[in-house]
Amino acid sequence: MTSETHPAPADGSAPVGFHDHDHAHCVETALANAEARCKEEGLRLTPVRRKVLEMLVQEHRALGAYAILDRLREEGFGSQPPVAYRALDFLVQNGFVHKIERLNAFVACAHPGADHSPAFMICRKCDAVAEAHSAPAKGILRDAARAAGFEIERTVVEAEGICPDCTEKA
């Protein structure tokens, strides 16, 4: 679960996921934005895709495909793994969701539609995930890639630690 007690800095620089916010508004806005973007781009946000996105936005933590499948089954959407994987593939491909490689799980994108290189902070105790901006194509990694003649196409930045809620509980 996410912290609801740690306010974000006024400058908006905080990672999305470990700060106080109106969670109901967060979910409502994310789904409305996804529906509008799908309509604008001619994409199909099927009921299963919408439900998976809703689950991930509600959680602010990484969920594995089988946890998602279990929840879909409870909601009456079917129980075969392709149901979850097809929805996740669509959501990842279109930037609504990110895959957290470290956990082999998925989290809703905090900045859908924006061209960005996210960095994830993952709480090792509660699996809460916060998304921040990173710029790995600038700086040391970019310089190393250039020196090797390598062209960076995609990066995944993940940091593991303890979120503010779990730190307070300790």
Image (cartoon, grey):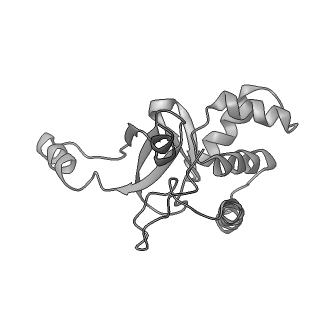
Q: Is residue 84 left or right of residue 120?
A: right
Task: Residue at 85% x, 39% y: name it.
Answer: 75
Task: Residue at 51% x, 45% y: name it.
Answer: 129
Task: Residue at 52% x, 53% y: name it.
Answer: 17
Q: Position of residue 35 (x, y in %)?
A: 71, 63
Residue 90 appears in which quarter of the rendering? top right
Residue 150 appears in which quarter of the rendering? top left
Q: Position of residue 44 (x, y in %)?
A: 73, 55
Q: Position of residue 112 (x, y in %)?
A: 55, 59
Q: Position of residue 9 (x, y in %)?
A: 42, 68
Mark count: 0
Q: Nearer the viewer, residue 125 or 101?
A: 125
Q: Nearer the viewer, residue 72 or 42?
A: 72
Q: Residue furthest right?
A: 76
Identify the image quadrant of the N terminus: top right
Task: Residue at 50% x, 33% y: name it.
Answer: 125
| 40 to 135, vertically: above or below | below
| 42 to 119, vertically: above or below | below
Q: Residue furthest bottom?
A: 10
Q: Is residue 121 left or right of residue 74?
A: left
Q: Is residue 14 left or right of residue 105?
A: left
Q: Residue furthest left?
A: 147
